[in-house]
Amino acid sequence: MRLSAENVCPQQHFLLEVSASAMTTPPHKTPLRFYARPNDLCWCKSGLKYKRCHKESDNREWREERKRNELTRIKPGEISPRRMVPPHIAAPDYALNGRPGRGSGKKTLNPEELSRLRKACLAATQVLKLAGAAIQPGITTDELDAIAHEAIIALGGYPSTLNYRGFPKSICTSANEIICHGIPDGRPLQNGDILNIDVTVFLEGMHGDTNATFAVGTIDETSTHLIRLAHESLWKGIHAVKPGLPIRVIGQAIQNHAHAHGLGVVSDYCGHGIGDVFQNGLQIPHVDTAEATTLMVPGMTFTIEPMLTLGSPHAEHWNDGWTAVTEDLARTAQFEHTILVTETGAEVLTQEPNSNT
Ligand code: MF3
Ligand code: CO
Ligand code: CO
């Protein structure tokens, strides 16, 4: 979910907390270069203010990167007419007018609610697997949307993204430099692309939300590294979940891992509380955020969905009002699970039994 305006910008904490792990990154590659403000000390440890040290060369570097990436950037394709949901499928409150209500406002679920959430999560897991298996060079993201749409309905669910705040399709498909919320369209996937598919299913009154990034055909080593680190970072976040601890520890774990490997973490989008409401107002930042003081308690359910970047972690948007891309148009990858806080840690709900992905 988009980080809300009431929150202080989490980027302000970065330079105060240069993690020791960031030292292992070659200086010209440190993600910290994207967070420095003019009067901060430079990330290179020269002792000079950033504006007197690397600011100009960093700016020049990312603008050049953007110029190179302009040549291969994804262009919006044609969006097909809206897909219909048959009347026997129970739809969420926003299905007709696009405006979600506030739901029960509860942040923890009782066993009966939890058993319904488990079903929604399992359905989303199965659909993500199916849509992911259909990926190959030449297929369009609109065709993937059709596959997911039909599969969700066959399982008795409603595709949660369809008309959520006006989103026009049944899944999000985000390729290459697209951070998240890409709209499925008529662009055929190309060998070497990477593609995130984000599936959310509304079933028995609950939303289950999961996503993964896939290779299209054969991808380069850098993209493989990015995808691997995005997946590992999600799991670092999951392993940080513990009742009694503040939400903040999740973003700390994710950020430390990404920065130690030279990658950025998007701070404009967070994980979210989830249940009878798709995004219930609880925010789960993926970077260290001092304001994330809410304590985790057993029965809480939320998503963790870090977006990692090869270059700049800052977003800009297409004029469709949805598609978020990196400002330097370098690649980005994401993984997402819906999790339950237990008495001892986390249980991943968007996983098939006996799976570890
Ligand atoms: N599933 C997405 C997420 O994890 C939310 C998509 S909202 C939409 O945050 F409106 F873009 F569909
Ligand atoms: Co989500
Ligand atoms: Co999602």
Image (cartoon, grey):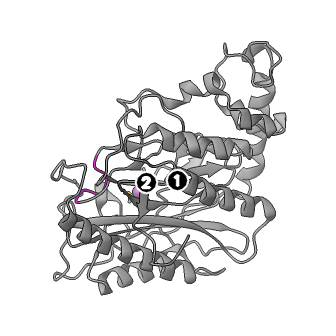
Q: In this view, does 115 lie above or below 102?
A: below
Q: Residues within 10 Å of mark 1 (few under 14, many from 20)?
A: some
The amino acid marked with disc number 1 is His
| Of residues 261 and 161, the one drawn nearer to the viewer in this rendering | 261
**Circle 1 SS class:** helix
Query: Horizontally, is 43 left or right of 101 in the view?
Result: right
Rendered position, 36 above or below 84? above
Q: Nearer the N terminus, badge 1 or badge 2?
A: 1
Identify which residue, 272 or 199, lies in the foreground: 272
Q: What stretch is highlighted in magenta?
A: 276-280
Rendering quarter of residue 125? bottom left
Vertical order, 220 against 265 (above or below)? below
| Residue 211 within the segment the image draws in magenta | no
Q: In which quarter of the image is the C terminus?
A: bottom right
Q: Position of residue 261 (x, y in %)?
A: 74, 47
Residue at 67% over, 16% down: 40
Q: Is residue 159 left or right of residue 136?
A: left
Badge 1 residue CB within 8 Å of ligand 2: no
Q: Name the residue under label 2.
A: 345
Q: In this figure, which residue is indicated by the disc labeled 1?
A: 239
Q: At 80% from the left edge and 40% from the top edge, which residue is drawn?
A: 25
Farthest residue to the bottom: give it.
154
**What crowding class fits label 2: few (fewer than 14 Cα within 10 Å), some (14-19), or many (20 or more)?**
some
Q: Is residue 328 visible?
A: no
Q: Which residue is drawn at 36% across and 44% down?
A: 296
The residue depicted at 33 percent of the width and 51 percent of the height is 273
Task: Give the amino acid at mark 2.
Answer: Gly
- For the residue pair 157 and 96, the one nearer the viewer reads as 157
Identify the mark at residue 67; answer none if there is no mark.
none
Label 1 and label 2: CA atoms lie apart by: 7 Å
Tell whether label 2 touches label 1 (CB within 8 Å). Answer: yes
